[in-house]
Amino acid sequence: MKPNNILVTHPIPDIGIRLLRGQGYDVTVLQDRHAHPPEVLKEQVRDCDALLTLLIDRVDAPLLAAAPDLKIVANHAVGYDNVDIEAAKKHGVRVTNTPGVLTHATAEIAFALLISLTRRIIEADRYTRAGKFTVWDPLLLRGDELRGKTMGIIGMGRIGREVARKCRAFDMKICYHNRKPVKPEIADPLGA
């Protein structure tokens, strides 16, 4: 029996492709890193059983109609706004996404930006690269500590909670606003 055909619309980490091929799937990876024109995707997906997309790929009724063997659209993204869910249902195509995979990364980036801003890291880097650093000065680009500062978090979902955990590690105070009440068992251990 011929392995199922999977179209991956953009390069993803090699480990993902190796896992699919290791299970016997026939995997085609499109190499363009930009959004594909609809006619290109329609042609490429025509004989596929599975489609692994990014959020820049529009998966709509015409695309689904062009792939009569398609069984699943796996969106390599937290959301699935790029997929017409009703059209997928009509065509009997399952839709999946990857919720939660960016929680830690997003919180870490937010915290990296916070540290960079507070400690003036980018400004100091530019200053040094421009050859302006000539002598150590205790007031030069000093920045400030995060310890004891108050972090305001809008939304205590997965990412907000992860940012709050990082704030606790820096001995910061945490205030938050959430549309719905946050359960005490979530907020209390964070001191929020």
Image (cartoon, rainbow, N blue to C red):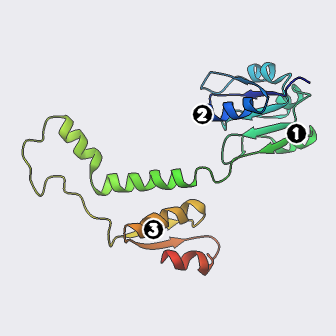
| Alpha carbon distance from label 3 to label 1 | 42 Å
Q: Position of residue 138 (x, y in %)?
A: 11, 57
Question: The disc labelled 2 sits on which kind of residue?
Answer: Pro
Helix, strand or loop at label 3? It is strand
Residue depth check, mark 3 versus mark 1: number of the one nearer the observer: 1
137 with respect to 14 (left or right): left
- Classify residue 64 by image quadrant: top right
Instruction: Choose the circle earlier in sequence order: 2 or 3.
Output: 2
Tag shown at residue 93: 1
Tag shown at residue 133: none
Residue 163, relative to residue 188: is it above or below?
above
Residue ID for mark 2: 13
173 with respect to 145 (left or right): right
Q: Residue furthest left?
A: 135
Residue 71, relative to residue 97: is it above or below?
above
Question: The disc labelled 3 sits on which kind of residue?
Answer: Gly
Q: Position of residue 191 (x, y in %)?
A: 48, 78
Residue at 67 percent across and 22 percent down: it is 30
| Alpha carbon distance from label 1 to label 2 | 25 Å
| Alpha carbon distance from label 2 to label 3 | 34 Å
Instruction: Choose the circle earlier in sequence order: 3 or 1.
Output: 1
**Crowd tier of the residue under label 1, counting other residues whose Cα lies within 10 Å: few below 14, some 14–19, many 20 or above:** many
Instruction: Choose the circle earlier in sequence order: 1 or 2.
Output: 2
Confirm whether residue 58 shows in the render: no
Residue depth check, mark 2 versus mark 3: number of the one nearer the observer: 2
Residue at 29 percent across and 45 percent down: it is 122
Residue ID for mark 3: 152
